[in-house]
Image (tube, rainbow, N blue to C red):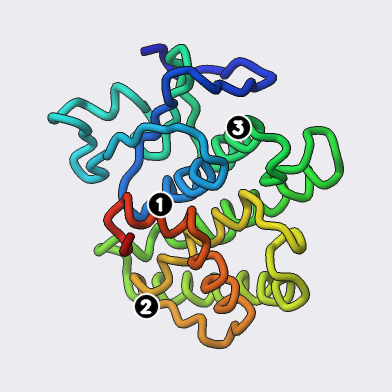
């Protein structure tokens, strides 16, 4: 297996080759590329990672796979490894450019996608992190929840005028938002003031690829 490094670009479609491998933990941010792969009908093998023990398979050391110590990791054909969810979902979408899950590279629409992925990554995803830590003081948790509520207010405005984040079509950004927003119930974050967001979550949850990904991770019914 090759060490982490730049993946070959431009990406190519790998029909007929061995499946790529996605290192995941159930319900973690790796759910986003898992959903995207199923939306694209890309063959992919799943390798479950114990996020606490940092092991996978029969006890193998996950640090040896990703020195960053977290999922997702996508093992490409040839053994190269790609990390960071926003990068992985764009790579996957570029394997099926006609799908529309990511606009064409170099277009303004692609930069709008990256803009939204960046917002979800920095303003939502990382803000949830201390809410999962038992040692985080209650006052910090309350402050983080208030921060998330403000950031979701912006997305509520976006989703009040379109079914998905970038308009009428589902994109990789929607898979990412769905994944992190699923954590709200776990950390007891009240999002009931955002009906458009709630409708979005139900809409995405009903997609067959999303249901299949949840089922494969043991998080839903087949």
- Element under label 3? helix
In this view, 141 is above or below 81: below
Q: Earlier in the sequence, mark 3 or mark 2?
A: 3
Q: Nearer the viewer, mark 3 or mark 2?
A: 3
From the viewer's perspective, is the residue at label 1 or at label 2 nearer?
1
Circles 1, 3 touching at the beta carbon (< 8 Å): no
124 over 30 or under it: above or below: below
Q: Quadrant of the C terminus?
A: bottom left
As rendered, which of 192 and 32 lies closer to the eye?
Answer: 32
Front residue of 39 and 93 = 39
> Considering only vertical position in the picture, is 17 above or below 102?
above
Earlier sequence position, callout 1 versus callout 3: 3
Q: Nearer the viewer, residue 34 or 119?
A: 34
The circle drawn on residue 106 is none
Q: Where does the image place residue 113, in percent across and percent down from the top left? A: 72, 48
Q: Is residue 82 above or below residue 218?
A: above
Checking the image for residue 188, the label placed there is: 2
* Separation of residues labelled 3 and 2 (CA atoms): 33 Å
Q: Residues within 10 Å of mark 3 (few under 14, many from 20)?
A: many
Q: Residue at x 66, y 32 (%)?
A: 94
Q: Which residue is mark 3?
A: 91
Which comes sooner in the sequence, label 1 or label 2? 2
Task: Give the residue at mark 1.
Answer: 213
State which quarter of the image contains the N terminus. Answer: top left
Q: Position of residue 217 (x, y in %)?
A: 31, 51
């Amino acid at each position: 297996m090759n060490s982490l490094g730049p993946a070959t670009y431009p990406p190519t479609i790998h029909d007929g080759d061995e499946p790529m491998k996605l290192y995941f933990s159930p319900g973690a941010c790796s759910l986003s590329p898992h959903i995207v792969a199923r939306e694209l009908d890309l063959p992919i093998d799943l390798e479950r990672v114990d996020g606490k023990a940092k092991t996978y398979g029969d006890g193998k050391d996950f640090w040896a796979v990703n020195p960053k110590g977290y999922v997702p990791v996508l093992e490409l054909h040839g053994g190269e490894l790609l990390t960071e969810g926003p990068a992985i979902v764009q790579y996957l979408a570029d394997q099926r450019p006609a799908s529309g899950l990511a606009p064409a590279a170099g277009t303004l629409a692609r930069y709008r996608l990256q803009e939204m992925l960046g917002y979800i990554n920095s303003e939502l995803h990382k803000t949830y992190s201390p809410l999962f830590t038992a040692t985080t003081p209650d006052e910090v948790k309350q402050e983080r929840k208030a921060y998330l509520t403000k950031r979701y207010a912006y997305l509520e405005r976006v989703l009040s005028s379109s079914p998905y984040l970038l308009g009428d079509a589902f994109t990789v950004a929607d898979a990412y938002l769905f994944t992190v927003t699923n954590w709200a119930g776990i950390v007891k974050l009240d999002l009931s003031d955002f009906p458009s967001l709630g409708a979005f979550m139900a809409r995405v949850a009903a997609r067959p690829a999303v249901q299949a990904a949840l089922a494969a991770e043991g998080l839903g019914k087949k």
